[in-house]
Amino acid sequence: MVATTDREDFVRLTDPYRRELLAHCYRMLGSVDEAEDLVQETCLRAWRSYDGYEGRASLRTWLHRIATNTCLTALEGRARRPLPTGLGEPSQAPEEPLSAPVADVPWLQPLPDALVDPASVAAARGSLRLALVAALQHLPARQRAVLILRDVLEPSGAADREVLDRYVAAFENADMDALLALLRDGVELEMPPFQEWFRGAKDVHRFLVARLHCKGTLRMLPTRANGQPGAAMYVRGEDGVLRPHSVQVLTVEEGAVGRITAFLDGAVIGRFGLPGELR
């Protein structure tokens, strides 16, 4: 009976930190799936050593230390998780078909904001951004851990949502002029699991013009990932049903789109809790 009560107390005390720990493990690994497994492992390790916890550090600090060590163990011998922009130069042929998806690369995954409590997203927004998580992948695991634990602050506000709304409207209305007006000159577009990527408003616009069809052929649902605005794109099939195409995460800079990371892996949609089809 005592053991049961102790276990219940442990769960009650540590549960408020689980989403925060998920964000921490994600930044270390670059994978939502692996981060969820490591949070479970962290809690198991914490429970096994809970009798030795003397309260010299806060419970939060103690759990983060265990999570960091768990991640460092998991990272031994692992390849980094990149985005296409980290693997080579931009493509110069935006109108050409893309090559086959690269299946043997462990691509960086997006982290749905819904999986992380709002306080954690607000406190760690800077260090959750896709570009920074991708950059961290180049560092040795222990250096990565030191930087992540600093939790950079970077406020975001209504301006990001305004840009997202205009971006969604431009796609849904097939208004390529409006879309071009939203892009920064040096905008980058990447689409894992495809290795090709494009830089510059002109090439990104050409790529999208070659593939965007008429108004009514797609719909976009606003979402958020990595503390950034995003949208899930659904494309209408011949049967009239809208099915998932991608989750697009935007980097907004000074009221314009500086980067579009479009995750074309169908499994990504499921992580965001979005519907499998629209009518």
Image (cartoon, rainbow, N blue to C red):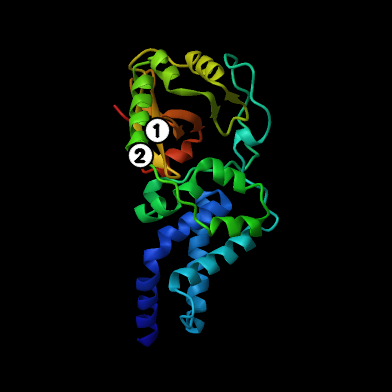
Q: Nearer the viewer, residue 114 or 104?
A: 114
Q: Is 38 rendered above or below residue 57?
A: above
Q: Residue 35's x, y, as percent?
A: 51, 55
Disc 2 marks a residue whose amino acid type is Leu
Q: Is residue 276 visible?
A: no
Under circle 1, the secondary element is: strand
| Image quadrant containing the C terminus | top left
| Image mark for residue 171 | none
Q: Nearer the viewer, mark 1 or mark 2?
A: 1
Mark 2, residues whose alpha carbon is within 10 Å: few (<14), some, or many (≥20)? some
159 vs 75, nearest the viewer: 159
- The image quadrant of residue 87 is top right
Viewer-closest of 270 and 229: 229
Left or right: where 16 falls relative to 77: left
Q: Return the residue found at the far right.
A: 77
Relative height, residue 49 to residue 115 (above, below): below
Q: Residues within 10 Å of mark 1 (few under 14, many from 20)?
A: many
Are the residues tagged 1 and 2 within 8 Å (C-beta)?
yes
In the displayed image of the protein, which residue is found farthest to the bottom?
2
Q: Is residue 160 above or below residue 128?
A: above
Q: Earlier in the sequence, mark 1 or mark 2?
A: 1
Circle 1: residue type:
Ala
Rendering coords of residue 67 (x, y %): 53, 65
Label number found at residue 274 = 2
Q: Residue furthest front?
A: 254
Q: Residue furthest left?
A: 279
Which residue is painted at 40% across and 37% down in the image?
A: 229
To which residue does mark 1 refer? 232
- Image point (47%, 54%), residue name: 23
Position of the N terminus by quadrant: bottom left
Measured from the top left, where is residue 193 in percent x and y? 58, 34
Query: How many tags in the picture?
Result: 2
